[in-house]
Amino acid sequence: MKFGNLLIAGLVTGSIYAVFAVCVSVWYRVSNILNLAVGDFAMVGALGVDYVYRVKGLPLPVAIITTLAVVGVFAYAYDRVVLRLAQDGPRRMEGIVVTFFFTFALSFFIDGVAKMLFGTDVHAAPALWNGQALTWASLHFERAGLLVLGCAIIIGGAFWLYIRYTLGGKALEACGENVIGARIAGIDTRRYRWLIFVATAVIAAIFGIVESPITGYTYLSGATISLTGFLAAAYGGFRKPGRALLAGLFIGVLEALLGGYVSAEYGDTVLYAILAALVLAWPRGLGFESAVSG
Amino acid sequence: MSGRVNGLVSVARTRSLAPTGVVLVAGVLIVVIYGQQYTGSVFVLAACYAIVTAGMAVQIGFSQQIAFSQSVFMGVGAYGVAMLNAHFNMSVLVATPIVMVGAAIAALVLGSVVTRASGLALAVATLMLPLIAVGYVSNTGFLGGPVGAPLTGQLWPSSSTTTSLVGGGLVTVAFLAIVVFVCSRILTSDIGLELFVLGVDERTAAAMGVRTPRRKLELFVLGCVFAALGGAAYAGTQQFVPETLIDPTAELALLIMLFIGGRRSVIGAVVGALVIQYLQGASNWVSVNILVVEGLLLTVVLLVDPEGLAGIAHTVTGWLRARYGDRVPRRRAAAAAPAAAAPAAAEPVVLRLEPVIAGQGFSANEAARETSAAPLLECRGVNKEYGGLSVLDDVSLVLPDRGLFGLCGPNGAGKSTLLNVIGGSVPPSRGQVLLDGDDITRTPPHERFYLGISRTFQAVHLIKGRTVLDNVAVACLASHKSSILTRIGRSRLDQAREQAAETLNGLGMRHMRDREVSSLTLENQRLVELARALAPRPRLLLLDEPASGLSEQQRSRLADLLHAIGELTCVLLVEHDLDLVAQVSQRIFVLSSGRLVFDGGPDDFRASPVVNSLLVGL
């Protein structure tokens, strides 16, 4: 049953990647900015709850609500101050500067502040669902893993329903297709930009809280999570949340299988080599905007 | 004319020599004065990083080829030197060139795989490199693993600490000066213009004859080799290679230095490395909280100016000049005076197309033409399918040496696709394209450019931020075939500009040559694009809707021009304006749903029931 257990573990990590990939690609549709700080919000969620609950000694629900509120308010303030100046200012910036580098700087900033506040040790939010792993026919289900999977299904499903069936979701799609066209049609693209940014930041923080009991976080964990989310979003062509979700699950399962069958040490190295080869061999099929030349 | 050209040459020379001189003089002074102190060691460390970021300014900033390979190759340089030094007791100065050659070969092999990808695919594929490298080193204990690799030697071996510190510092400054010189030369030479176009739009670059795959590979190797040199200097001066050097965060830190300094500016990239390293070295608080400082600094600098500190400095000097009007602009104005002296606006527009088109351009091909009996261009049964949807269905046509040929059809008939198939940017699913009877179906677009095929695009594809002259000069560069390195010595930019100026004069566009292209009207932008397509003296000119968006009067001027061009070369014109097509074309092809449904002269065209039902709606 090694394969079954590896598959379960892969699906759990894959669902985390998938949620971050969905967050990255949904916001990219609206803003044309890649959120490289999404993982850092997750880290702040996990370490923030740990800090308020364990160090300050406040009750767990208070800790969770405070942390999420801080993340949401910070994300809103960041959009109002920095992104408004960058995208809505007199000199509208375009290209790689705005696509990558503002959120890249944000990621560094959040990590630095987290280092000041939470230190450099490994911490985690307290487990929300305690107890022994559930066992069924020699398959093991960690409770925290099931919680992560459940959250992923709920959040992914909610996003899908929102985009597929609501007027807001259609407007959101329109923003991604053509910003000026969307504005002419009366859609406030700026409002969607901050709305989705704050929403994805809070979702990321929730995932950090739920997931951290499994792996444990340091102030640098955010960058790794952002990276995997970014990769999964890239394999989904950045603009397609559905494909990003599948890509995230695929990467998670592949990682677990490589770790289990190939080598525990080199699993990740082989994984990255496979992912790089995939991009080079099949860029158009994977939805990269530009094709292979020559 | 010659005065103007001489002015340009001297400007180009000072532009590449000035940064090198500043770096050399300032670097030597700092090392000699502060060499033995803490400040000196911080500066030398910064110089090691600056060697890497200067290469990144050319590769990532200027040419927009985003590849995350620098930290890995910095590691190749540093670990390579450390291994040769520790195991073979080789001196660092001897090991450095060996390691650089090794890095160049490795970069060539790796680059020939990864640079096949463009844009985001290139970024994502190379993003894996630091991840693979750090995973390998820390898990295997290879090269010292997480502990790092120590060196016994120094960059400047000496028994006295003072001499070795100052000597090592001076060697590093010399390395940096060489790198800055090479990078500035590349950016101010004709290759710089090519790379600028490549950075803006790869497709346009290829249509202008830029050998995009080769340039991308060269840029990749250049970035990697300079990174390896920076790594070797790092190992030699720090005498220790930590694992963190190849960590993905190291790559990100390099990018931050580049973007704070100014991504397109070599000197800006050097300053960026200095600023970050100095801040880290000067204050313990900054060193501990470097992430906060880098994040804030990058955000603020980019908000003020996306071109970083170099952009801010440029704005400030421009403002100071405007405010105080010092001597520098006057000298520049004097250099430009001969060109400006001619009363531009009053000049009557005279078309002198013969020298423009029938000049030396592709004379070698022209000579070959004399003996060949085959038609200039032939399409044989061309098919194009996109995922089962047929866009071109068995299209065959033949074009002779001279004349203007119209290509019409309703929207979605496959006109632009056919043009792309002939131009080479879209491969046909089936069928052949022949030029002079030779099969060119698999020839890439930049090779077709040299065979004499030139084109314009449906949407204007000019290079923003450059003058009209430079936009036309891109297509005249005779340097396309040579490598980046051989162009460092001599730039042919002036020759290309001269040829471009000739074309502009011939088309009566002399007065707009020094204007920035986005300040032109649509009509003039289309004319510049036409001039750019004509400048290399093509044998086959592909025009994609040159009249769209133009007024009635502008169209009739364009018709006269097209008529004159058609006398001298072969033109295939895709156009929606049927009157214009019928007026200028000697033969007209009509496409409908990918099939060729009409082929005949303008009179038949006007009378044809097929054409009328399809295009006029009668």
Image (spheres, coloured by chain):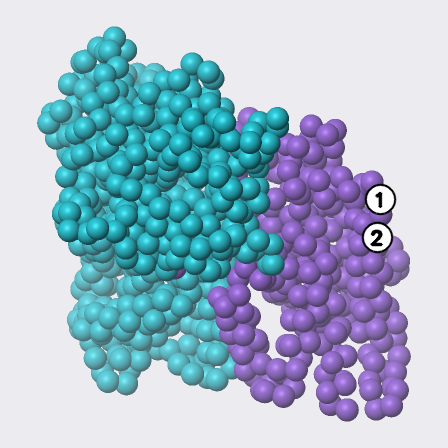
Q: Position of residue B165 (x, y in %)?
A: 24, 63
Q: Which residue is mark 2?
A: A161
Q: Is residue B568 above or below residue A170?
A: above
Can residue B13 be spotted in the picture?
no
Q: Position of residue B536 (x, y in %)?
A: 24, 39
Q: Position of residue A161 (x, y in %)?
A: 84, 52
Amino acid type of the residue that numbered disc 1 sits on in the rendered structure: Thr
Choose top left, top right, bottom left or bottom right for residue B331: top left
Q: Position of residue B130 (x, y in %)?
A: 47, 68
Q: Kindly identify the residue that appears in the image at 87 percent across and 55 percent down.
A: A62
Relative horizontal placement of residue B278, taking residue A179 as reference (left or right):
left
* Of B596 and B608, the residue lying toward us: B608
Mark drawn on residue A203: none
- In the rendered image, which quarter contains the C terminus of chain B? top right
Q: Are marks 1 and 2 in contact (CB under 8 Å)?
A: yes
Relative horizontal placement of residue B328, taking residue B393 as reference (left or right):
left
* Of B233 and B386, the residue lying toward us: B386
Q: Rounded to the nearest whole Å, what is the CA distance between mark 1 and mark 2?
A: 7 Å
Dot placed on the residue nearer the N-terminal end, 1 or 2? 2
Look at chain A in the picture and name its colour.
Answer: purple
Q: Is residue A50 above or below residue B60?
A: below
Q: Which residue is mark 1?
A: A166
Look at chain B in the picture and name its colour.
Answer: cyan
Q: Is residue B63 above or below residue A256?
A: above
Amino acid type of the residue that numbered disc 2 sits on in the rendered structure: Leu
Choose top left, top right, bottom left or bottom right for residue B342: top left
Can residue B5 be spotted in the picture?
yes
Q: Kindly identify the residue that appears in the image at 76 percent across and 39 percent down.
A: A171
